Amino acid sequence: MTSRSCFLLLFAALLVFPATARCDERTDQQLPSPITLEGAVNYALAHQPILRAQGAQDEAAEANLSLARAQLIPRGDIGLQENRATGNVVSGSHFSMAGIPPISGPPTGRVFDSGVWGSTAGLSVWWDIAHLTQQMALVDAALADRAGSRAARDAGELSVAFAGADTFAVAVEAHQEVEVARASIERARVLRTDVGALVRSGLRPGADEARAQAEVALAETQLARAEQAESVSLAQLARALGAAGQPITIEAGKLREAPPSEQAVEIVSAHNPFLVGAAAETRAARAREHAELLEYIPRVEIAGALFGRGNGLFPGGANLGFAQGAVPDTPNSAAGVIVTIPIFQYPEIRSRVDLAAAQSKLSLARRDEVAQDVQSQIDSARAILNGAYKVAHNTRVFVDSSSAALSQARARYKAGLYTIDAVAEALRLLAQAQADDAVAQVEIWRAKMLLARAVGDIGPLLAEISEASGGH
């Protein structure tokens, strides 16, 4: 085998093995089957892409805070320069360097010669002491931004957890309706068999058998629609968990059972991320407004520099021959205070102050709006929960009464006291009652989780999720 063939085989192996590793990595993240409510929420918190995006925003806020703190440190540079220049006007001319004082002098000649070497090396430091308070205000704003970013991350986790739990409950409701539809088909088929026997015995007209067959077809249609709704709900659940396209089966746990009626938590949590984020936004806006006001203060900079210069126009120093001046052998120092009053920038500063003040007012309005929204969500969730308990109680009565009515209707039909219409109506009534009852039990859990989410703390929500999953 030639070296070229070996290289091609090695290259092919490098392509195949990483691809295999990627496939294995995706396989490791398959959804458990079946998956419980608690497992679904945990999976969503670990795999939902939106949380990774919010994590990146949190890192960006942390970096902005570090940048704001770095602005408090005095500015300083270390500069090195080698050049070759003529000296007809300025002895020892050099290119401008930050912090190194320029040197000027009288003309020394009128001949455009080939030039000489020049060098500069120095350390310079300057610090705007008058605007330290402004930089501190900007640090406060960055701290508030970081708190707001963390609150946004917590809000994202709360929203993802609730969305996963609520979508899971919807999938359970859809599955319950499928089971009810299947039970309705079985009852319709039993009715068709009983009616067929009576028709063949001459005790009932043939139209009754056709009506019974129509009830079977209607029940099968309802089953097809219920199965369609279940498939859609499972697809939406996979998307809410961050596993779109993966097959999913669910374990309902206690969602099929109505939870005990108890006093639910209704107090807004101090850790509500929506309120925390709104308050952080207000603090950041106020800090930026304060920083803009401090722009009116004149700049007072303390500057200092230690630097060495070398120039080939003058004798002395290092004896480097043609490269004389390539070494900065002449020490220099400079220090001073620089005061800058930006009088022509005051209109611009005033406009920025007005803009910051408007943004501060906007953040206050948003904070109050968020507080209103949170309280409204709690009140709505409480009303939904109370209504869900009442509906569940009524649907249980509805099921019992409909079941008894169907039994009586079938018995009276066989005795010739009822027509097939009465039996069909009782059959549909029971199917509707069972479907409503199956959904009503899950709706209580959904309302409890909605109230826990409205409170704004992920702890109570996860507790409700664990309880609904059968955990402790």
Image (spheres, rainbow, N blue to C red):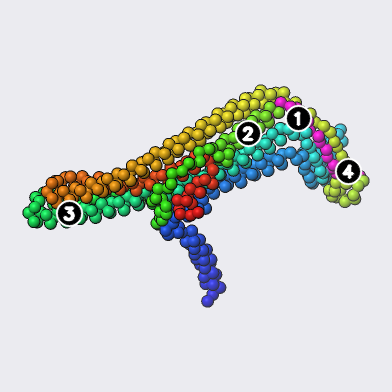
Q: Are marks 4 and 2 in contact (CB under 8 Å)?
A: no
Relative depth, front residue between 369 and 359: 369
Which circle marks residue 212 in the picture? none
Q: Residue at x 58, y 44 (%)?
A: 57
Task: State the CA–CA distance, disc 4 to disc 1.
Answer: 29 Å
- What segment carries the magenta color? 295-315
The answer to which image quadrant residue 385 occupies is: top left
Label 1: few (<14), some or many (≥20) within 10 Å?
some
Assess whether mark 1 and mark 4 are in contact (beta carbons under 8 angstroms).
no
Element on which disc 3 rests: helix
Please tell me which of labels 3 and 2 falls first in the chain: 3
Q: Main secondary structure of the magenta part?
A: strand
* Residue 270 point in image, percent of width and height: 58, 39
Return the residue at label 4: 331
Rendered image quadrant of residue 10: bottom right
Give the amino acid at mark 2.
Arg
34 lies above or below 126 = below
Verify CB contact (< 8 Å) between mark 4 and mark 3.
no
Residue 298 falls within the magenta-colored stretch: yes
- Specify the label residue 299 is tagged with: 1
* Sequence order check, earlier mark of 4 and 2: 2
Q: CA distance from mark 3 to mark 2?
A: 72 Å
What element does badge 1 sit on? Answer: strand
Residue hosting label 2 = 283
Classify 10 Å Cα crowding around label 2: few (below 14), some (14-19), many (20 and above). Answer: many
Numbered disc in front, either 2 or 1: 2
State the residue at coordinates (54%, 37%): 268
Q: Amino acid at mark 1?
A: Arg
Q: Residue furthest left?
A: 202
Query: Which quarter of the figure has residue 104?
Result: top right
Q: Residue at x 43, y 44 (%)?
A: 261
Image coordinates for residue 267, horizontal then vertical, percent: 53, 38
